[in-house]
Amino acid sequence: PQACLEALLTRIRVTIVHERVGMVASKVPVSILTGFLGSGKTTLVNHILTQKHGRKIAVIENEFGEVGIDDGLVMETKEEIFEMNNGCICCTVRGDLIRIIHKLLEKATFEAILIETTGLADPAPVAQTFFVDDFIKSKCELDAIITVVDSKHIIQHLDEEKPEGVENESVEQVAFADKILLNKIDLVDEEEKKQVIERITSINQVAEIIETTQSNVDLDRVLNVKAFDLKRVLETDDGFLDIDQEHMHDQSVTSVGIEVEGELDERKLNMWLSTLLQEKGPELFRSKGLLAIEGSPHRYVFQGVHMLMSMASSGEGVGKDWAEGEPRVNKLVFIGKNLDRKELERNFAACIVKTKKPRKDEC
């Protein structure tokens, strides 16, 4: 039986950035956006949502973790939200994916659909959706599989040894890509970048590699590019269209979600996060959170990939401030191996301020 990742939150955002009058294609081009945890997928989604490209795009998100964080990281837009059942988009929720695409196509006309998978998803079963459902096949065409690669960490994920019968998601994501965004090139030198490119091309020689920082790319290079080639995929994987083909995820990769109301002592928080990433970084694939800092009206965004960490706030234009009277609920997600839930919860609780100081917006 398929071994599916647990506790996934999936939402669909129907986003109209800028409407225009023009010819609508007979079939809606669909792009699948994939890439390992922390590679920069959500950053690319934000570029797509905010650029004035004139396209009417539906964005479908699949998030791994017990607590939803990405809805707070994605730029605010005109949107509609549809819930999908818990499960991995490449496994148990494919039926929901089909159902939601049916709803989208029945109620509106779109110039493109973008599906952002979880960082632990195999893109092949998601792509399969567009060849096994007759209605979707008649209305949509798979345009491209876009894989975002973290230049700093990709090789260690490609080299990771998995249990027998368990797929390496990073390898699958690179192998099935039509376009590869070689992201975070500012974090590697020329020799490291050369090694990464050589490793990628040893797995996939045909995908175009586009070098990026902060996932910033000309959308004309990744959307409506007609890059997916079913014939090539079948030559590589003759079981691609077999809907009963089994695949197993690495069950040693788990997530811990924390959701607690309160304000945080900034010094204690920074000390704890820095120590955590230094000690657990190699096995901590991804960490992220939305945080309330004592005395500040701003919402803070924490992002971590292995030992690298960044912190930004709505005061710097990232996200939006806490609304007046809004409960200050902190949300964090940690994804990795050998996670100790009780220890994470205990150490985070120690950062919560017991006696609040007045906030700047209350003075």
Image (cartoon, helix red, strand yellow):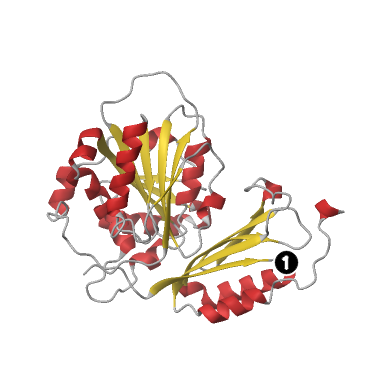
Q: Position of residue 90 (x, y in %)?
A: 29, 57
Any part of residue 225 in sight: no
The kind of residue tagged 1 is Glu
Any part of residue 172 in sight: yes
Where is 156 relative to 28, above or below? below
Which is more toward the observer, 229 or 345?
345
Q: Which quadrant holds the N terminus?
A: bottom left
Q: Which quadrant holds the C terminus?
A: bottom right
Q: Position of residue 33 (x, y in %)?
A: 37, 48
At a point 16% along the width and 59% down the height, the residue shown is: 244
Dot 1: what SS? Answer: helix
Residue under label 1, please give it: 266
At a point 65% along the width and 47% down the height, the residue shown is: 320
Left or right, 230 with reference to 91: left
Q: Position of residue 217 (x, y in %)?
A: 46, 40
Q: Position of residue 257 (x, y in %)?
A: 52, 68
* Rendering quarter of residue 223: top left
